[in-house]
Amino acid sequence: MAENLLLRNVPPELGRWIADSSHNHRISINHFVQQVLQHAHQLDKPIPLFEDVPPPAATEHAGLPFRFIDLFSGIGGMRLGLEAVGGECVFSCEWDVHAQRTYKAWFDELPDGDINTPGLIDDIPSHDILAAGFPCQPFSIAGVSKKNSLGRAHGFEDERQGNLFFKIMECVDTHRPAVLLLENVKNLKSHDKGETWKRIKQEIETRDYARFDTIIDAAHWVPQHRERIFIVCLDRKVFGEDPQFRFSAPPPGPQCRLSDILEPSAHPRYTLSAALWSYLQNYAKAHKAKGNGFGFGLASLDGITRTLSARYYKDGSEILIPQPPRNPRKLTPREAARLMGFPDDKPIVVSDTQAYRQFGNAVVPGVVASVGRDIVRAIASELRQRGRGVLLNPRSPQGRRRHVA
């Protein structure tokens, strides 16, 4: 069978049927058309071109095509991970204008803005997977501590960010995706003495989704200790009452050392001033005397770093690079990008301050790709049991497709 087919002068209606049918069968357009032609040849008699063609046995490797949406997309860490395992992003949403700028530079697509915009959820295209790294500040240890010190509400009581989980549930109610992939800080489970996690589980389970969750440390992929909770939810109407899903064991890590991602030389502006370096040392001594663990983190070049945070732009204290006899320095923005697993071909198009914020808020694409492969295996298993089938809820509104700018 030919490896590639070139289709020309295909009527629009036929082209749409080919595209939709190949997606529904979870195979490429090329493979679908080849099967139609092969089926006609084997019958050796005229057949309607639109006769249904059964798909091949689904495989467990990455590349099974699926459609996903990227909510609270940030700079696209989720998108990079899911695209790496065969996903097609059909909608993205991010309110921060600086993150939008980076997303546009990386994917040539400007995300929609505030998810609270009336009618926006209704217009989201149909999709197989809803991916959302919903804002973690209302639930993180540092975020809760800061909000408490300022006398502000946190968790679900945070009016600006804490209620965004319920916008995800609104999207679920509207579109009923087959799979949900959610990500947040490890502290999500313990926030508010477990009440926040209890509410999240309740919201998911009352919608008849089977929930699977685990804490994953990105240190198996990048030289950074970064623990996050990943939640995978499978629609029981699609996968049955007892869906078969498991998270894969992480690869033996780390895959590289801190020294492997450092630039040969860094501009002097990233070296700490004498005043700042003195302040950080005195600050650490004062807290150590009180029995606290607060202080700067002088990283080992042969090891891994602490977690990169969104506040890194302030002083870089959690990850300092030794460079004796000079004072330590901060990571450069490119090094921070590498520490998160972002490739060098993704340009940095914002200020250093915004770049540090974006990388500190991001998700490691390699971790998402690993979880994505686990989801693909679950989808493939379901398709094998069906022999054929469509994961999308047929009653789901088609919505509008994204247009590349």
Image (cartoon, grey):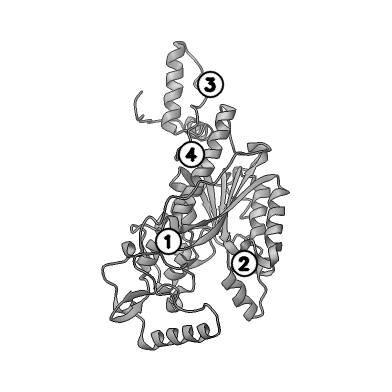
Q: Which residue is mark 3?
A: 51
Foreground of the two, 385 or 106? 385
Amino acid type indicated by mark 1:
Met
Q: Are there few (<14), some (14-19), or many (20+) residues within 10 Å of tag 3? A: few
Residue drawn at x 44%, y 14% is 42
Q: Point out the tag, 4 or 1, that comes first from the N-terminus.
A: 4
Mark 3–mark 2 CB contact (< 8 Å): no
Q: Are there few (<14), some (14-19), or many (20+) residues within 10 Å of tag 4? A: many
Residue drawn at x 49%, y 21% is 49
Q: Quadrant of the C terminus?
A: bottom left
Q: Is residue 118 visible?
A: no
Amino acid type indicated by mark 3:
Glu
Q: Which residue is mark 2?
A: 139
Q: Which residue is mark 4?
A: 65
Tell me the distance, in whole angstroms, between the alpha carbons under discs 3 and 1.
Answer: 48 Å
Residue 239 in the image: above or below residue 46: below
Looking at the rendered structure, the secondary structure element under dot 3 is: loop
Residue 92 in the image: above or below residue 36: below
Q: Which label number is shown at residue 340?
A: 1
With 264 as the anchor, is 66 left or right in this view? right
Q: Is residue 363 visible?
A: yes
* Residue 365: % across, % down: 45, 54
